[in-house]
Image (cartoon, rainbow, N blue to C red):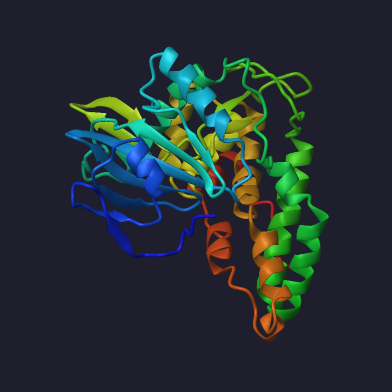
Amino acid sequence: MTSVARPSTGRAASGAMIPEMIPRDLWARWRLSDATDLGGSRSRTWRVRRGSTVFALKWLPASVRADWRYETQVMTALRSAGWPAPVLAEEPLVRDDGIWRLFAWLPGGPAPDEGSDDSEGFNRGRLLAEFHAASSPLGAISRRDGFELPREAVSDPLLDQWLTVHERHLPEEGRTLRAYREAAAALLAENGSDLAAALPAGVPGGAAPGLPSGVPSGVVHGDFTPWNLLFESGTLSGILDFEACHHNHLVADFALAWRGDHDDVIRGYDSVRPLSETEWRLVWPTYWAWLFLGVKEILAEHYSRPGGASRPADLDWQVRHLLKDSGLLAATCGPKPVDLA
């Protein structure tokens, strides 16, 4: 298996320095001449060249279990609908170390800062509603393997067990985490947030089979943030990073784009597709549920290793985001329904 941690470099035939973590056979196969590391979390991305043409090279580690073909299916369908989603320049290369894909480089850059985060958020919310109008009817695309739905994330008994362990080390923080987990699970169950394992896509304003009216579902992007949207001369020219796309309630997408306090994202979304009462009630618990994704693994890894029990695991980021307040949600749905006593 090719190492993914070595920072050293080699040289291409052209003499350009290349990251050694890019397989040399791939470098030759796709006739690449240089690479600039653009970073990444679950995966990694490089800006590469073939002659004078620029591409995006993406690597998805073998340890990531999500179905990578799902992304291709979604991006292809969106491009057919007129949306500037990424397009493959070569057939993906499947190796022991993961999946390597070469994409055409999309033009443009993030929307210019107009001096108002509110205007950016409102416009992005409107754009997300338009995106859902195109992505929701993708009827052949249902659930993606390897993705937990919000209610599953907060109803896992193993999460509960590890939160109990963490609470012994940090009682106050542990109680806070438990209160939000319990509130999220209860609210998601109360408002009918279950999705079947292979749920056909709904349509905006409708409901998927087995769900209450007013909870539309479909393919969500999963990270509809300013840095994943490209514009050229004021027109959307690219949507990046479909790594988290999957089938879910549409609430999941704008809850993530909202991130707990970007209220104008929801205002912009609601101005295009007015939210139902049930959807408003699902915003908080859906957002909280996402903050628990990976927590079970963090706690299990920390407290299971030698010496891990001698100090608490670091969940400060999750707690800070759980404690965010929203004037819009408070005005629309009342105080946060969390018992921190």
Q: Where residue 220 sits in the image (x, y, percent)?
A: 54, 31
- Horizontal side of 189 relative to 172 (left or right) equals right
The x and y percentages for residue 314 are: 58, 72
Where on the picture, by quarter, is residue 51?
A: top left
Residue 277 lies, in percent from the top left, at: 64, 29
Relative to residue 231, is residue 318 drawn left or right?
right
Whether 11 is drawn above or below 231: the answer is below
Tell which of 227 and 50 is nearer to you: 50
Q: In this view, does 337 lie to the left or right of 57?
A: right
Horizontal side, residue 59 vs residue 187: left or right: left
Can you see residue 226?
A: no
Count of marks overlaid on the render: 0
**x and y, in percent, of residue 38 in the image:** 33, 50
222 over 182 or under it: above or below: above
At a point 28% along the width and 40% down the height, the residue shown is: 32
Look at the image and tell me in which quarter the C terminus lies.
bottom right
Q: Can residue 48 be seen in this view?
A: yes
Work out whether residue 273 or residue 337 is closer to the camera in this orientation and state it. Answer: 273
Residue located at (67% from left, 29% from top): 143
Q: In this view, does 108 lie above or below 97?
A: above
Seen from the viewer's position, the closer of residues 86 and 324 is: 86
The quadrant of the image that shows the N terminus is bottom right
Q: Residue at x 73, y 62 (%)?
A: 178
Look at 42% across and 32% down and name the residue there. 125
Among the 4 quarters of the image, the one containing residue 139: top right
Which of 293/181 is in front? 293
